[in-house]
Every structure is written in C-alpha cells, then in structure tokens.
Image: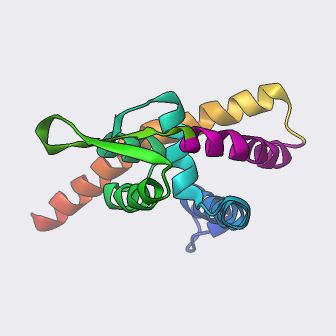
Amino acid sequence: MQSDHFDLNRCIGALSLRFSSRLGVGASQEYHERFQIGVVEWRILCHLAVEPWSAVIAMGNSIGVDKSSVSRALVGMESRGLVEMRDAARRKREANLTEAGLALHRQVLPIARARESALLSGFSNKEFDQLLDFMQRLITNLPKVEEDAQSRAAAERT
C-alpha cells in the first residue's frame, strides 16, 4: 500500500544526491586545500590517465559532468600546465595530460584511494562487488526514467 507522502529516506534519487553531494564537497575541500584542484579536475585527471587525447564530450560522458564544466576546467588545467589541448576532427577539442598532469594524478591518487577505503569500511569484497553491480544497474536504467517522463509528457499533450 502506498502512503500519501514521499519518504526521502527511501528514495534512491534523494539518497544518491545526498550521498554524492556530501562526498563531493568533502573531496573538493581536501583536493583544493592540498592540490588546488576540485572534483571535476580530479575526474578529468583520472579519465585522461587511462584515455589520453580524449574529446571534451567523451570526457563529460565518462565522468558525469556537462561539456561546459569540462571545458572550463580544462582551460584552468591548461593554464597550469596540467593538460595540453589539440583540435580534432569535426571541430572537436581533445585533451591529454602533460608530465605535470601525470605527476599531480600520482600525488592525488593515494588520497583518493584512502577516501574510498574509509567510505567502504565495513563492506566485504562481496558487498563491494554487489554495490558496484547495483550502481551500474541503476545507471543503465537512467534512460528508462527519461523515456517514462517523455511518455507522461506526451500523454498530457494529447
């Protein structure tokens, strides 16, 4: 039986937003204080460490950030000598880590791993694998949420 209110403590969207916000704010503060970068720059460093010469749009899709945020972060990173940029086919821009960018990635990596380790304390390896599986399944279902919203909007127009 459904109640007449929406319990935000049992709502995946609300819980994931609360979780992501708290985790992101903490990481951003620590990374900014220690390395003068934010979470977006850290995600870009991680992405480019494994996928050099990536297009801005591909990076945004990979790290879950819009293209304009990636572009703004890359401008600052390029001015600090952390990335190099080049033009690619179809008016695309691609980025790659410089030696300084790779060095910064190596500096931040142990801190990021320590943060994740603290976050996952109390989880078994099996639970961690299950959590990853659940999260990937939720991500896979995101297009269904959008399709559902579009169906409701279409039904309201008719």
Residue at 33% x, 44% y is 85
Q: Nearer the viewer, residue 81 or 12?
A: 81
| 103 in magenta | yes
| 19 in magenta | no
Task: Specify the principal SS of the magenta part.
Answer: helix
Direction left: furthest residue: 158
Q: Quadrant of residue 101?
A: top right
Is 93 positioned to the left or the right of 12 in the image?
left
Q: Residue 113 location, x and y as percent?
A: 76, 41
Q: Nearer the viewer, residue 8 or 50?
A: 50
Q: Quadrant of residue 11?
A: bottom right
Is 65 positioned to the left or the right of 18 in the image?
left
In which quadrant is the C terminus drawn? bottom left
89 over 92 or under it: above or below: above
In which quadrant is the N terminus drawn? bottom right
Residue at 30% x, 45% y is 57
Direction bottom: furthest residue: 5
Total number of numbered discs in the rendering = 0
Is 11 positioned to the left or the right of 145 in the image?
right
Q: Residue 129 location, x and y as percent?
A: 71, 28
Residue at 77% x, 48% y is 111
Magenta-highlighted residues: 100-121
Q: Residue 79 location, x and y as percent?
A: 43, 59
Q: Nearer the viewer, residue 127 or 9?
A: 127
Q: Tell me, yes or no, if residue 137 can be seen here.
A: no
Q: Residue 144 location, x and y as percent?
A: 35, 43
Which color scheme does this rendered protein use? rainbow
Direction right: furthest residue: 122
Residue at 48% x, 37% y is 48
Q: Tell me, yes or no, if residue 64 can be seen here.
A: yes
